[in-house]
Image: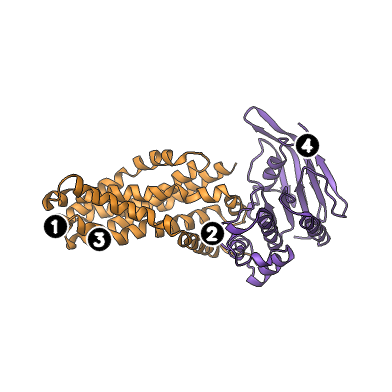
Amino acid sequence: MSVGALQAMNLVLRRELCLSFRRPDQLLQPLVFFLIVTTLFPLGLSPELSLLRQMAPGVLWVAALLASLLSMDGLFKGDADDGTLEQLALSGQSLGAIVIAKTLAHWLVSGAALVIMSPLVAMALGIPVTAFPTMILSLALGTLTLSWLGAIGAGLTVGLRRGSVLLSLIVLPLAMPLLIFGANATDRAIVGDSPEGAVYFLAALCVLTSSLAPLAATAALRITLE
Amino acid sequence: MTAQLKCLEVDDVHVWRGDRHVLQGVSFHLEPAELLHIRGPNGTGKTTLLRVVTGLLRPEQGEVRWAGRPINEARAEYQAELAYASHEPALKSDLTGLENLRFTVGLKRRASDMELRDAMATTGVAACADLPARVLSAGQRRRLAMARVLAMRAALWLLDEPFTNLDVAGAEFMSRMLAEHVDRGGSALVVAHHDLDVGRPLRSLELAE
């Protein structure tokens, strides 16, 4: 009996989550990084609330960007090193579907976890509670977009020995619009303006990368497999 | 598709690696219930040839056909019929033996845990089903990888040095497994640098430098 694409994706997703939870240290690393980087700013600059509130959106977004890059490197690396990637590519399933499932699993354990933790950090930075819904929504869209961009970068660099630096160089420039509009949305919500425009833009970027990045990442992986 | 049609044809395959002309016009046929032993010294492109046959590597020139169709035209159908065991056993060290198999076999066909445990028992690693792959020895990992090949129930086996890390009993059992596969009408391409004795007619292809 053959296995359908959705079942295959479900299988990959479950296995990725299972693997992540067997390695809690790798799961926690980006989260702790996020927490520590954001607490460094008040210590280094000034604990004054008005200043913090002004910088908070930028700090939050830069930290989230770097934290999710931290784990991106391992997206395909482990599978490429132990030969699992070849088994996946020869499974008779579409490699694209597998890439989508792997990236979504990665987002769930990195991006989504950051989003869940963001209110804690936001409180420490003095962001008012009224801005939380916008901040959470924009971070959710932003980190998902980042995971897609990261999948392209990880696919391109998986064959290289020190790929993680190159991965950052590929992904960070592409992530600039995210930073601009994400920080802008949060900023507007803090001062009480309507953040709609920026959030729509983030949503558009998310849709764009969700549809195109799997194709690009799959093509990159196929080149690596040769 | 009838069994008679499940024939692998490799036609004048050329592969360059940089300046090196690794495969210089390799051609062969593999019919159902046939074994082909690919041999040759290190660095003569045995693994490269196997990767070309899997479709992972596209040859610069030449073609690989399965059941009369080029493999990149009917990729999914072809892949559903093949089981590839690479140099690395492709096991996740944090998952148990059973979980490892459940996942890689599960992408190819629906296999119950019973079937997977049976396959593990056949290859002599039933006791490793619930142990994380991290604690297994190299030989046990190889046997687990062979259990995966068995559980995939594929018509075509592509094995890269399947005898590595196996003890005497393991090597005997591996030969028996190949013989049984041939008796079931399956075909296999085995890369091994030493002589093979599986008790079935065996063709061999020598790759030279």
Query: Residues at marks 2 and 1, common chain?
Result: no
**SS type, badge 4:** loop
Query: Residues at marks 1 and 4, common chain?
Result: no
Residue underneath mark 1 = A192
Per the model, the C-alpha gap separating discs 1 and 3 is 20 Å
Mark 1 nearby-residue class (10 Å; few <14, some 14–19, many ≥20): few
CB within 8 Å, label 2 to label 1: no
Per the model, the C-alpha gap separating discs 3 and 4 is 63 Å
- Please give left or right for residue A144 compared with residue B204 in the image: left
Per the model, the C-alpha gap separating discs 2 and 3 is 32 Å
- Which mark identifies residue A120? 3
Q: Which is more N-terminal, label 2 or label 4?
A: 2
- Could you say which chain is coloured purple in the image? B
Per the model, the C-alpha gap separating discs 2 and 1 is 48 Å
Residue underneath mark 2 = B94
CB within 8 Å, label 4 to label 2: no
Give the camera-side residue of B170 and A68: B170
Mark 2 nearby-residue class (10 Å; few <14, some 14–19, many ≥20): some
Please identify which colour was used for chain A in the image. orange
The location of residue A198, given as percent across then percent down, is: 24, 52
**SS type, badge 2:** loop
Of badges 1 and 4, nearer the viewer stands 4
The location of residue B185, given as percent across then percent down, is: 81, 60
Give the camera-side residue of A89 and A127: A127
Mark 3 nearby-residue class (10 Å; few <14, some 14–19, many ≥20): few
- Please give left or right for residue A212 compared with residue A89 in the image: left
Specify the quadrant of the image occupied by residue B24: top right
For the point 24% across and 48% down, which residue is it? Answer: A40
At label 2, the amino acid type is: Asp
Q: Is residue B150 above or below residue A89?
A: below
